[in-house]
Amino acid sequence: MNVSDINNEKSKVAPLLVQLYDSHRIYDVNKDQDSGARMDLANAVGELLESDISPSESEIIADIMISMIEKAEQDLKIAIADKIADLDNTPLRLLIHMTNDDIAVAGKILENSPVLCDMDLMYVIQSRNAEYCDFIAKRKTLGGAVMTALAETKYPSTVKALLENSDILLNESVITTATDMVGSHEDLAKPLLARKEITETIVKKVYEVVSDELKAYVLENFEDELKGRKAEIDLVFTEAKEELTEQSEAQDDAPAMSIVRSAELMKKNRLISTELLITMLKKSEVQTFVAYFSAFCDLPHETSLAILKQKNGKGLAICCKANDVLKTDFVTLYLLTQKIRGEGKIVDQTYMTKAMDYFDQIDVKKAKQILQASQIPKDSFVVDL
């Protein structure tokens, strides 16, 4: 470096350095009383760096600025960082120095500086904590290697910042990492599902691991994605029912609204099977069963409860016959719904025999007619024999 470069008559830097020096001196005198002096100094820095400078001048300016910033108070550092963050000719050495400062100083530069290249950003990712990575994740352009390195930190806030960055196209590595993290960091679910890069498989994986509230959100917003491969979805929904139930021993059998919504969507997609209903009863998921049985039979849950509480099982027989349920499955459903009927562990053989006889006697057409007439809520479901 040669200071004579600045003294060259063609150089515009000398008067700007004088202005910088004067502003700095005024700031030193008034920094405790006058915030305007701080802004004047920051503006002088910005004007100097925006000028047309040569590489040698840039090095000299970097030396001067680093020396000044090392002695500066936090407020001045922040003001200078805000001023130079967007400039495309700020000396790299100055920027690197400032990115190693407190996050209040480094943040704007990490997020916005066009001078920082992938290698500079990778160094920060590997050497600093989540706060610094969060700002990098917000950049309007990110290389694939930087993106992957940010995701691999597995900082929840950094991964969320990547997911919420609408200016970039996320690579597969980021999407995979975010999906793996959703189970333990549910706040990643919605921004992940909002990305255009996700696939049907991602939607299903997210559904499997999130809470009841988010399950309802997924069902409502990704109905088409959840329609594929029936066998796989049946398995996912069957395993998920335990998380959807909002019941306890002290509660009645009326299903919660989140379960009702889930059941309605499953019915719409033709994904409620007799096997699924039986599985719910075996798991003692009474509220969930009532909601899904109601959807299966197209009945209000009040009517379904009235049917299920009948000791003679005739209403259940009608529902099963109208929906082509096998006799063996009907018997299983009758046995497993004894808790809803308020019975003990021993099923009354007389009632069970009558229920089975009625199932054999009634034909499908008649069962459908009776069921159709019962789809308006009633105080009770009555079948005359």
Image: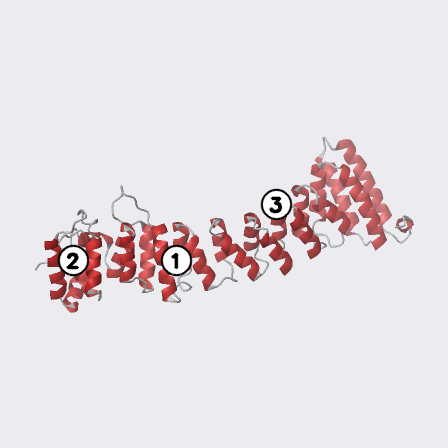
Residue at image position (51%, 59%) is 195
Figure quadrant of residue 371: bottom left
Residue linked to disc 2: 315
Residue linked to disc 3: 131
Q: Quadrant of the C terminus?
A: bottom left
Check disc 1: other Cα within 10 Å, few if <14, some if 14-19, many if 20+.
some
Name which residue type carries label 1.
Answer: Leu
In depth, the one of 32 and 345 nearer the eye is 345
**Residue at mark 3 to residue at mark 1: CA–CA distance:** 34 Å
Secondary element at image label 1:
helix
Name which residue type carries label 2.
Answer: Gly
Return the x and y of residue 323 as percentages of the image width and height.
Answer: 22, 65
Residue linked to disc 1: 219
Q: Residue furthest front?
A: 346
Mark 3 in CB contact with mark 1 (< 8 angstroms): no
Lower position in the chain sequence, tag 2 or tag 3 = 3
Return the x and y of residue 334 as percentages of the image width and height.
Answer: 19, 56
Query: Nearer the viewer's eye, disc 1 or disc 2?
Result: 2
